Image (cartoon, grey):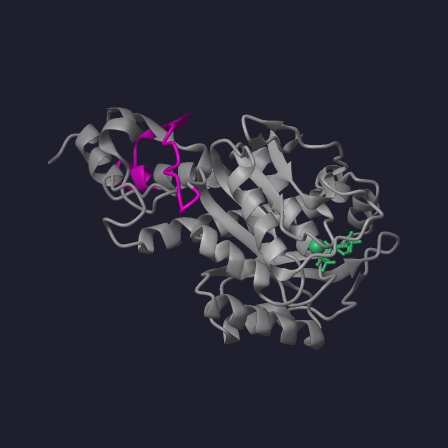
Amino acid sequence: MSNPSDKIHQVLSNVRDPETGRTLDKTNQILSVEATEEAAAVKIGLTSHSAPIKDEFESNVSERIAAVLPQAKVEIEIEEFDRPPVPIGQIGLTAKSVIAVGSGKGGVGKSTVAASIALSLSKSGAKVGLMDADVYGPSVPQLLGLGGRPEVINSKIQPIYHGKMPVMSMGFLVEEDQAVIWRGPMLHGSISQFLRDTYWGSLDYLIIDLPPGTGDVALTLSQLVPLTGAVVVCTPQQVALLDAIKAIAMFRKTKIPILGMVENMSGFTCPDTGKVYEIFGKGGAREKAEETNVPFLGELPINIQMRQQSDEGNLASALDDPICAAAIDKIVRALARKVGDEAAAVPTGAALPVL
Ligand SMILES: Nc1ncnc2c1ncn2[C@@H]1O[C@H](COP(=O)(O)OP(=O)(O)OP(=O)(O)O)[C@@H](O)[C@H]1O
Ligand SMILES: [Mg+2]
């Protein structure tokens, strides 16, 4: 019969790193194992990329150890482990996961969802950047209350920071009341400049807010860097869902993996009575996700504060609202898990470092 430490090592040899989807690196990630039949203490290194799902990783490992050492009190300690991103694409972007948030339709809350996902990932401890790829109608600066002109230092555009999070948007480069009238090639140029020439630093996640409509920007992006995938945002009513189906077809055509669908504005809880009104219906996106074989990441209800605080440039504080925060947290966790699954599906020897 193997001793308690061996049993734990055996368990850990089957645990996957949530970032790479591969087994944990014995030398750098299994930092210490001390165990008797009565007590087990394990120290594991995880990257900040896994921060959004660190707690569920911890309880999963704890349960698996408890299954082989049923008498033991199990303690898991997670330490941050640094695995720098491998530069990707022809432009050498240093981001581990590049996620575009889009939909076929305007006004369904893409920017709100993109910025909320970025804020929530960042709050969990991940290194996050937010790029507003809507050059004609940038709304990220407004949502986050950011302004100022990016400086250029050493031929890199310095982003504007929301806390620790670098943000880049056309909104920082043109006056608010000026229209940006550009032809296709200039659009392509500005998107590649944002991606290539911005000083993003080393990122776990780069979240990209796509403009509404056709796939120009998605196509441009996918030519510059391999996107980890796209999140499709839609509202529950039929007209919006039809556009979401088009967006799914567009991402599939441009070979951008679809990480999942988010239903926004699903249901409204009346603050006076607590009664729930399904203003645009509910569950439509979940059904369409199933029909089209796309994961459903979660739903975000209509929230008056979210709209008010976004208008005031303070989306971040709308996420202090427990209902909003829980909804976004669920979406972000589902997304982080899905990213790990996608990474695991990359054949050995490809872009990912093999552990
Ligand atoms: N869950 C929500 N609850 C309340 N208001 C919301 C919610 N989601 C978005 N909104 C509001 O809806 C409006 C449109 O949102 P947003 O700008 O994020 O949409 P969009 O899809 O990015 O639009 P566009 O197509 O113009 O880029 C904003 O006023 C925003 O505050
Ligand atoms: Mg938008």
Q: Residue at x 34, y 41 (%)?
A: 17
Q: Quadrant of the N terminus?
A: top left
Give how far across and how far down residue 241 sits, in percent: 64, 73
The stretch in magenta equals 64-91
- 148 or 244, which lies in front? 148
In the rendered image, is residue 38 in sight? no
Q: Is residue 117 left or right of residue 175?
A: left
Q: Is residue 9 left or right of residue 342?
A: left
In the rendered image, is residue 268 in sight? yes
Q: Residue at x 76, y 34 (%)?
A: 147
Quadrant assignment, res 312:
top right
Q: Quadrant of the C terminus?
A: top left
Q: Residue at x 79, y 40 (%)?
A: 313
Magenta stretch holds residue 253? no
Q: Is residue 5 left or right of residue 127?
A: left
234 vs 303: above or below:
below
Quadrant assignment, res 299:
bottom right
Q: Residue at x 36, y 50 (%)?
A: 343
User: Where is ligand 1, by quadrant?
Assistant: bottom right
Magenta stretch holds residue 79? yes
Give how far across and how far down residue 66 sits, in percent: 32, 38
